Every structure is written in C-alpha cells, then in structure tokens.
C-alpha cells in the first residue's frame, strides 16, 4: 500500500465498521474479568469509532482526523513533568477511590500529583506519553489503572532495589563489539538505531541509555546518525556468521520513513542477512500513525517486507502490548492494514506486577492480539533493572501463568514465557530453571548457547516477594 492507497484503505475500514455500536469500555459484547479491586471490560467486537480521547478536557473538540494525524500526536505528546502535572490537574477527581485501607497512595488529586513528583525524582526513566496512551488511562481511578503503573511513577510504590540489580542488567555493553551493536548470539545481533522513544516505559531494560537524563541516571545516549550507522553496517558485513538482525533502540517510531528504508535496504543487500526484525512499540502507543494518509512509516515497513519476501528473506515487525486496555479500534485498523499487506507482526509482553500478572488478564491480552493477527511471541520475566522493584514479579508467578494458559488456545498463538538472564546469558524458558529456592528468591539456569555455557546464571526475585528478605539478602 503506497501513500496514495492509504486514504482508500481508511475509507474502506470506516465503512466496514460503521454499523457497530459506540465502543469503549462499555457497550458491545464484553469479557469481564476480576483483577484485584477493579473490573476489566474488554470488547470482543470489531471496534466502532468511539472518540475516547475526548475524556481529556483539552481534547474534547479534537476531530477524528486530527487525532489520527501523527503530526498532531507528536505535537500534543506530554514530554515533561510539568506538562504531565498540568494535564492531571484537569482530569483527576478531587477525591480518589480507595479500595483497600492498607493501600499506599494518595487520597486526593493534589496528593496523587505530589506522589508522582516524588516518583519522578527517583525514577530511572523520564516522562513521555502520547495522547493515545493518555486518553486510555482511567483518570477517575488512577491508583488501579494498568497504564499508570507502566508509565507514571508513584513515590509511595517505590521499593528498595535488590542488591543484585543494575541499570545494564543484561550486560549489553559487555556484548558490544562496536558502539550500537549487541552481538550476544552467534547468528543474531541487535542494531541500536536510536536511544529515543515516543513514550518512556518505567521498566525499560535500557534505562542506562534510553531517554533523557534523570535524577537517578546520566544516560549514554546515541542519536540516529548515518555516520555512526556506517560503522555498525560495516561490522555486520564483516561478520558472515550473522543471519538475523534486530533493529531496535530506543524505538524505531522516532525514525523517519526514509531512515527506516535506509536501514532496511542496506541490511537486505547484505547476502548473509536472512532475517530482519524491526522493533517498535508504536502499534501499541500510537497506532494512528500506521493509518495516517500523510505519513509513510507504515509504507516503508510494508515495502521492506515485500522486497524481502521477493529475495527469500523475512522482514517482521515486533511490537509491545502489555494489557488489553491498550487495544482500541485504531489499533485494529492499523493491525489490519499490516495484515492485508502481508507484514508479520509479533508481540513481546513484559510481565509486570499489578499490570498483567493475572491469568484472566494475560489470557485476554493473548486472545485479543491473536484476533487482530498479532502473534503473541514472548512473555518476558521483568529484567533486574534498578528503580523498578515494585514492578518485578517472582519467578513462581510466570511459572503459574504459563501452567494455567498453555493449552487454552492454539499452540502457535501461545507465547513463550522466558527469562532474559542477567549478565548476558540470553533468553531461557522460565520453566527450564536448574534450581529455584522460593525462600531466598534465587533461581539458576544453564544456557548452553551463551558466552559461558558452563556457568550457572542467576535470577533473583524482588526482595518484597519472599519471607525473611531482610535477613537473607545475598
């Protein structure tokens, strides 16, 4: 689909969905699942065109065409703490719902904003959010909202770091033969194109380099400069063992369509590169760009996918949804465009405390992704990164989730539940541990394909998840 075809696609999808009722978290056929003290309502219908962004007072008159515009999305993104506080003052109720007398957190709007201020001072990641994501938050009940947990730090929820956590928990800098390349597996490498994202996740595994500096971290940033990419291309060309390249960052959504084409064409023209994966959270956090008739980012991915197919090479898009509430009617239109054009899309989820560490929530996410032809590929145990202990879960939770979910849907739509081993041991199935002591929170793994196949690689549960934590610190 080229730029001229995009408006035709959008018009066709408008007609196809026009008969559905108003869509949001009410209406349509829904699946309701209890999760903590809230009710999760997920539509099973194709999405109708509910203007969900109009719950934000500043955007109450924004048209559908403007909201879909990627230019409008970037112009109206929250990119500073000050902007976030200003928005929150306009959407938060004076008194916040309280679901548990022992629950930490503010009881008023002013108290909540003060709590966020405290969290930002301690967080490793800066604040940055798109209008799409801000519009999906349930501001009437922010203490229970899964998107708030992912993107907005609350000081009252922060927990002391485990002594084993680090900012570069996977030792990516140790596996970097040239700046911008991570070469951990013999036939695969990561190409870090940029250190900028359209949103910043609290739990980012690359908090040591991604985003702007915070009180906690002085970042080792890298910009999307062709001169720097040339050194990376040269390494890949000189390393014939490489067959698979993950182009990542940062987030490739921050690159222009021409930059995407430059990277993709260059890699496709290297004879020994057979598989290219473009990593972007864009489909989850700003899906409208993929159906914006005035933006060519999706067209660039589609062109590379089709060119690769003609060459007998695979080009795929890897994205990142963590909760069913992130899927809207715009998401469905964007996913449908990619599916019609033959683009392979896979999803990588991170298991996060209070977000998706629940069987019904995870099942719902997997089923909804499958229904829009996005393959649930991985569920990652959260990495041992500093500043996110309140978001990490113990290993036994991912083991329980897999045992409950595997077999409930088609095997090819069931994700692998994995641990990315701290120190650079690579990905291992969570259930493949060699030992696991729930009393100390220590699990060990063997990784035959790693740089040290004889080593017992360690993963530690968060301190708060096991008894006697204070006495048993390693």
Image: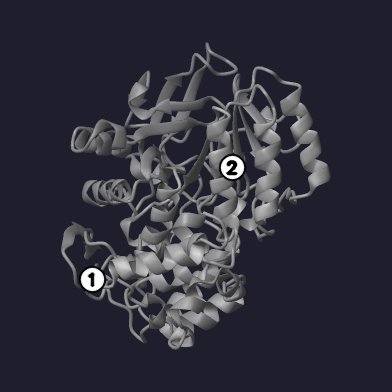
Q: Is residue 118 above or below residue 345?
A: below
Q: Residue at x 41, y 77 (%)?
A: 53
Task: Name the residue furthest right.
Answer: 227
Question: Residue 227 at x, y = what percent?
Answer: 83, 44
Q: Is residue 222 above or below residue 85?
A: above
Say whether residue 98 is left or right of residue 383: left
- Residue labelled with disc 1: 20
Q: Nearer the viewer, residue 281 or 36?
A: 281
First in sequence: mark 1 vs mark 2: 1
Query: In which quarter of the view is residue 156 placed?
Result: bottom left
Query: In which quarter of the view is residue 408 placed?
Result: top left
Say whether residue 241 is left or right of residue 105: right
Q: Is residue 396 above or below residue 449?
A: below
Residue 154 seen by the camera: no
Label 1 environment density (alpha carbons within 10 Å; few <14, some 14–19, many ≥20): some
Question: Residue 224 at x, y = what percent?
Answer: 74, 50
Q: Is residue 257 above or below residue 270?
A: below
Q: Are marks 1 and 2 in contact (CB under 8 Å)?
A: no
Element type at mark 1: loop
Question: Residue 203 at x, y = what percent?
Answer: 50, 51
Q: Residue at x 52, y 66 (%)?
A: 292
Say whether residue 335 is left or right of residue 80: left
Question: Residue 350 at x, y = what percent?
Answer: 42, 45
Q: Nearer the viewer, residue 151 or 332?
A: 332
- Residue labelled with disc 2: 304
Element type at mark 2: helix
Q: CA distance from mark 1 to mark 2?
A: 34 Å
The disc at residue 89 is: none
């Amino acid at each position: 689909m080229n730029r001229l075809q995009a408006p035709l696609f959008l018009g066709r999808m408008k007609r196809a969905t026009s008969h559905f009722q108003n869509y949001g978290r009410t209406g349509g056929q829904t699946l309701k699942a209890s999760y903590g003290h809230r009710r999760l309502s997920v539509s099973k219908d194709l999405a109708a065109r509910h203007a969900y962004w109009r719950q934000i007072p500043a955007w109450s008159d924004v048209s559908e065409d403007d909201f879909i515009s990627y230019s409008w999305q970037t112009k109206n993104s929250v990119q500073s703490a000050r902007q976030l506080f200003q928005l929150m003052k306009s959407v938060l109720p004076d008194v916040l719902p309280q679901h548990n007398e022992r629950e930490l957190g503010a009881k008023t709007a002013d108290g909540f904003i003060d709590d966020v201020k405290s969290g930002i001072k301690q967080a490793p990641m800066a604040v940055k959010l798109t209008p799409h994501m801000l519009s999906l938050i349930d501001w009437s009940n922010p203490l229970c909202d899964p998107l708030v947990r992912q993107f907005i730090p609350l000081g009252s929820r922060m927990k002391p770091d485990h002594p084993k956590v680090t900012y570069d928990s996977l030792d990516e800098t140790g596996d970097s033969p040239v700046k911008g390349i991570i070469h951990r597996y013999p036939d695969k490498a990561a190409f870090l194109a940029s250190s900028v994202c359209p949103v910043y996740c609290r739990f980012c595994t690359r908090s040591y380099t991604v985003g702007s500096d915070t009180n906690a971290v002085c970042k080792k940033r890298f910009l999307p400069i062709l001169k720097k990419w040339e050194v990376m291309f040269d390494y890949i060309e000189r390393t014939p063992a490489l067959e698979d390249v993950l182009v990542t960052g940062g987030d490739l959504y921050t690159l222009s369509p021409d930059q995407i084409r430059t990277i993709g064409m260059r890699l496709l023209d290297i004879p020994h590169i057979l598989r290219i994966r473009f990593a972007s959270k864009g489909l989850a956090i700003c899906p409208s760009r993929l159906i914006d008739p005035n933006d060519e980012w999706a067209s660039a991915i589609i062109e590379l996918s089709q060119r690769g197919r003609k060459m007998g090479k695979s080009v795929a898009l890897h994205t990142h949804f963590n909760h069913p509430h992130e899927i809207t009617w715009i998401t469905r239109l964007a996913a449908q465009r990619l599916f019609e054009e033959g683009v392979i899309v896979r999803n990588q989820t991170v298991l996060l405390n209070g977000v998706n560490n629940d069987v019904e929530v995870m099942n719902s996410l997997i089923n909804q992704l499958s229904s829009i032809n996005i393959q649930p590929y991985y569920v990652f145990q959260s990495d041992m990164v500093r500043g996110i202990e309140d978001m990490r879960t113990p290993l036994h939770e991912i083991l329980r989730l897999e045992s409950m979910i595997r077999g409930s849907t088609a095997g090819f739509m069931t994700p692998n539940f994995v641990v990315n081993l701290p120190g650079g041991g690579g990905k291992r199935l969570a259930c493949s541990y060699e030992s696991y002591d729930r009393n100390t929170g220590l699990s060990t793994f063997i990784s035959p394909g790693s740089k040290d196949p004889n080593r017992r690689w360690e993963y530690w549960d968060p301190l708060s998840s096991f008894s006697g934590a204070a006495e048993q610190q390693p």
